[in-house]
Image (tube, rainbow, N blue to C red):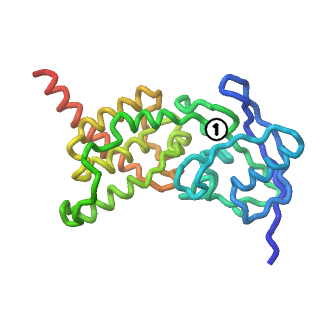
Amino acid sequence: MATEKLNLTLKVWRQPSSTAQGEIVTYEAKDIPSTASFLEMLDIVNEELINKGDEPIAFDHDCREGICGMCSLTINGRPHGPGDGVTTCQLHMRSFRNGDTIWIEPFRAQAFPILKDLIVDRSAFDHIIQAGGYISARTGSAVDANAMPIPKPVADYAFDAAACIGCGACVAACKNASAMLFVAAKVEHLGVLPQGKAEKDRRVLGMVRAMDDAGFGNCTNQYECEAVCPKEISATYITKMNRDFAAASIKEAVVNEF
């Protein structure tokens, strides 16, 4: 069976630098295989632009397997596009119809400044991780499998949170540009495990405060973050993190008072 070919109109955000004025530019994407991924479609368009001597569209990517989270695009107003539980690189052109117009923009958030075209600076997430997204336990050698038994529900809870790839879709979808889902996932997947409990309070205080310092907004519980998360992480982690933050803040206040 022959592969269906699509002719599409692309409305792409072009911005030559972080200080330049940006604008939407129209491109015609012709004879795009429906089996191509969204990033492969952009590769085809860029090859045509380069052959014409034009500047290719700059976009971020690495693994192209839904692991790294770098392929962060807003497609037709939705972070990562129309698919559920997928990143931009996992989105295929069969999700679109021949003749469609596709709007492609970078993630929009004050804490994610645009570097060029569709590439944003997400180093604010790195600063949050540096504020506490780690453990200090020795990891130089493997321990016996039964030396630290962890109940299956706890292990599953931690694993689901650890699936976060830090792509920033939660921020881009939130009207307040909140990073609460990202931070909650990073805080909670360590905080419930024995290796991470020793630094639990310091972790949640440090990471939440780093999030606030970076300029991310607060959560208003409308669940846009959960709806667009490519790893389908639940917003219930935010509830748990808020409780942990409140408890840690009270402990800190008591210690400081004495």
Residue at far bottom of view: 1
Q: Residue at x 43, y 33 (%)?
A: 127
Residue 45 percent location from the top left of the image:
80, 49
Q: Nearer the viewer, residue 131 or 213?
A: 131
Q: Give the answer, above or below, for where 145 lies relative to 114.
A: below
Q: Residue at x 70, y 36 (%)?
A: 117
Q: Give the answer, above or below, for where 62 lies relative to 57.
A: below
Q: Give the labeled residue for mark 1.
A: 119
Q: Which of 82 and 142 is in front in this view?
A: 142
Q: Give the answer, above or below, for where 120 lies relative to 144.
A: above
Q: Which of 75 and 31 is in front in this view?
A: 31
Residue 128 percent location from the top left of the image:
41, 35
SS at mark 1 in the image: strand
Residue 118 percent location from the top left of the image:
67, 39
Query: Which image quadrant: the N terminus?
Result: bottom right
Left or right of 32: which side holds 68? Answer: left
Q: Which of 51 and 197 is in front in this view?
A: 51
Q: Residue at x 52, y 30 (%)?
A: 111
Residue at far right of view: 52
Q: Which amino acid does label 1 sit on?
A: Ile
Query: Which image quadrant: the C terminus?
Result: top left
Left or right of 14: which side holds 186? Answer: left
Residue 213 percent location from the top left of the image:
41, 26
Q: Residue at x 73, y 25 (%)?
A: 21
Circle 1 crowding by C-alpha within 10 Å: few under 14, some 14–19, many from 20: many
